[in-house]
Each structure stands twice: as C-alpha cells, then as structure tokens.
Image (cartoon, rainbow, N blue to C red):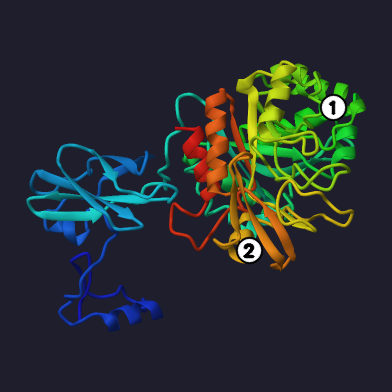
Amino acid sequence: MTFRTLGRPVGFLAPGRRLAPFALAALAACSSDATAPITAPVGSPLDSRQRTGAPSAPLALTAAAGNAAATVSWQPPSNTGTSALVSYTVTTQPGGTKVTIAAPTTSATVTGLTNGTAYTFTVVARSGAGAGPASQPSSAVTPTVPIASHGRWVTGYYVGYQRALYPETAVDFTYMTHVVLGAVQATSTGGVTTDFYLDNTNGPIMARTLSTRAHAAGRKAILMLGGAGYHDALVNATSATYRATFVANLLRTLDSLRYDGLDVDWEPLNESDKPQLLQFFHDLRAARPALLITTPIGWVNANLGADSWYAQVAPLVDQMNVMSYEMADNWGGWVSWHTAALYGDGPDHPSSVSSTINAYRAVGVPAAKLGVGIGTYGSCWRGTTAPLQTLAASAGVVASDNAMSYANIVGQYYSAAAYHWDATARIGYLSFAAPTGPQQCAFVSYEDPRSAGEKGAYVAAQGLGGTIVWTLGEGHLPSAASGQQDPLLRAAYTAVAP
C-alpha cells in the first residue's frame, strides 16, 4: 500500500520508526489506489473549481446603503483562471436577489431592497471556464430613506426598560433622523452610570449595538441624561465642585459608546436650578464645540406664557423639543381635554401645541431650534366620555405612559364605533358609554397616524426644527407588515422630513 500526499508517494518508514495511531487511521481510510479526492480551502490554488480553470473569489467587498438599495464594490480575483473574465454575480442575503454585470466592471447597485433591513452581499466571478467560488460576505448595511436636505429632525426615543417591546437589533431607522437612548445618569460626585435600566454588562452592549446600527443607517445617535426622578443627582453633579469632572466623564462615555451627542433632560426644572443648568450647557459647549446638544422642555399653560430664560438656552443647544403630551387632567377649573391637542386651547383647557410654540417664540426662542413632541401613548380618563366636559371631583386621568401605549390602545381599546376625530383640536379620541378595557376607560385621548401627520405638517408649515417621538417601543406594532410597524413615526417623518 502506498500513502499519497499531494500526489507524491511515500514508500516506507525509516528503520525503527512506527506509525502513530492517527497515521494508521489515515492509512486505513485511504483506498489502495489512493484516488480519494484532496480538498483545499475555497479560493486557494488547489480549490477544485480553480483546478478546472475557473477564477478565484473576488476580493475586498464593500457595500454602501441607499434608499431601498445598496451599491456593492469589489476587486477582481487574484487568479482569473485559464480564460478571460466574463461577468460577476452579486447575491443578496436575506432574499437571495441576484444581479449580474459584465466584466470588467467591479461594482453593482442592487435595488428593490426593504428599508430598515440589514443585508450582506457575496460576489462570484465567471469566466469561459465557469464560475468560481463566492467571495467572503460584505459587512452588513441597512438601506433607508435619506434625510432631507432642509435639516429638520425626527427623533425617536429608545429606553432600556422597554427593550422587550422593540429589541435594539430590530429597530428600523428608516423614519427617523436621530435616535436617543435613555438613559445615563449622574452620580452625586460627577460620575456616570451606564446600566440603561438593565445592568452594567448588557446596558453598554445594547448601547453600542444601537449606535452602530444607527450610524450604518446614516442616522445620529444621542445619549439621554436624566429624566423624571433623577433631579437631585443632576444638581449635585453639575455643582461647581463636580461639574468639570462630570463633563469629562460624560464625554468619555459618549466616546466609549460611540454617540454623537447628549440630550439633557432636567426634570423638574426649579427656578433655583436655572443658573446651574445654564452654566452646565456653557461648559459642555466649551469642552466640545461640535457636540450635538439637545434638551426637552415643558409645554406651556396658555394662561401663563413662557419663561424668557429659555431664550438664553437657545444659543447653547441644537434642539429644544417640547414634551407636548399629557397636556390635560382634572387640574382645578379644567374641563376634560386632549392629551396633545394641536389647536383649540381655551381658558378652561389652556393647552395646545400651537399655543406652546407661539409662547416660546414670543420670548425669543428661534423657530428652527424648536421641536414638537408626539407621544406614542395616550391618556385613560374616567368620569368623562369626551373632551370639553365639566369634571366631577372624582374624574380624571387614571393611566397614561406605558399602560396606555399606542400598541395597547390599538389592541385593547380601539373600535371604529368608538373612534372620533376632533376637527378643531386635530386629534382623535375614543369614547365609551361604559368603562372599557384593562384600565376601565370612558375616554381615551391619544395620537394616531392622522394626528401625528397633522403635527408634522404644522412643523413644516411653521418652519420649526422637527419633532420627537416618545417612545419607539410604545408605538411599535411587531405583528404589522414590514415598513408598517411604526405608524406614528412614519406619519411624522413623511410630513416633516421629505
């Protein structure tokens, strides 16, 4: 018996040498005529396809996402085989779409892709001798609708405690320009926490995944700082004692997690806090002049007007986004009213998006710095069945954020018979003759795609900066068709951004 290695016979062992067990096993597996095929790595000179004259695999694939499309580029194979190259075929995954182009062109655009879906690509070269092996896959890219040149924003908030509603690996960036991840928090001595309501291991992993996917889609990623319940820690961290340390720690956190900016959510904002917050904005801007700085601000009671202090904030930040949701309840002298009316405020229901925007503009905040908030949750009222009703002492809002998400309202409360559109306020609502649903609501005020579109149109018509959506998770409908799973975000983007 002769054992062949790469076609060369090995006759006998040297005197005194014995075959190791693995070699005996290899000999036993060989046929007496040593015709067993010899394999080699794909793309190597011994690859069987190349030994028949076919080309090797194309090299150095790159892919760039477009609008429902991607452009794939590569370098020719290092070994073209025994005849000239004829064509290249690009294959898309998922979906298996193939595009073939004539050589020597080394790029191709694949169209008909789904915005928001991540794709990889491979390329096969073909010559007169046949097709060679596939290239290594490209890095994943995500086609998406391009951001309009006028620069208005549609910002979606993503919070770690709602991760189960919308995994960060599935977020569709098609209908937003920015994503804000909530939230990092201050420690009392100027440190920064990064658990994102999860833990210190999974929180940063989630954060990096979200920023990486946002950047791949051509979107900006921002870290939210603070929020309701974190006021005291912010006061301590931004004091003269710790502010420089805090600013440095924030910038290191942004860089580590690969984020483009900071969303400063100081709630509540007491009168005594204002000089300290203003200095914090000054120090952030001085430390990194190109940093993207945004801040959410409260809606304005039309009977009172806006504070002129906000005109001092405007030059230091890029966006000032109004939290225009939960704008009504049984607040002493109020009648029942919508959670986010666009128009129609009055003395006994003094809230609307338009009156709030007018109030901020009146004290000197530029329109281009102002954004309108769209809530992906509503208000469940008891003791009233519609807007503009006189309220008994026991009436009021009994559930809102989280419990009354848009997904829950659509799934647990909505019916065509209960739905009404307020043509003055430009928002819809549900009215029930008897308590309905898990929260036993008689009146549900909420945003739907029609009202979100109205607010988007208002932003464009008034020359405002953009809109924010709180939150992505509550507005997500995972069972809807692809491209239809974020209807409020999509309606806002369609009106604001293009």
- Check disc 2: other Cα within 10 Å, few if <14, some if 14-19, many if 20+: many
Label number found at residue 243 = 1
- Check disc 1: other Cα within 10 Å, few if <14, some if 14-19, many if 20+: many
Residue under the image location 72 percent in, 15 percent down = 364
Q: Amino acid at mark 1?
A: Arg
Question: Residue 232 vs residue 3: left or right?
Answer: right
**Foreground tag (2 vs 1):** 2
Q: Where does the N terminus fall, quadrant-wise?
A: bottom left
Residue under the image location 18 percent in, 37 percent down = 105
Question: Residue 28 vs residue 246: left or right?
Answer: left
Q: Is any part of residue 162 visible from this angle?
A: yes
Relative height, residue 43 to residue 142 (above, below): below
In front of the other: 177 or 459: 459
Q: Quadrant of residue 320?
A: top right
Label 1's element? Answer: helix
Question: In this figure, which residue is indicated by the disc labeled 2?
Answer: 413
Relative height, residue 365 to residue 302 (above, below): above
Label 2's element? Answer: loop
Q: Where does the C terminus fall, quadrant-wise?
A: top left
Q: Is any part of residue 218 visible from this angle?
A: no
Residue 176 position within the rendered picture, expressed as x and y whole percent measured from the top left: 53, 39
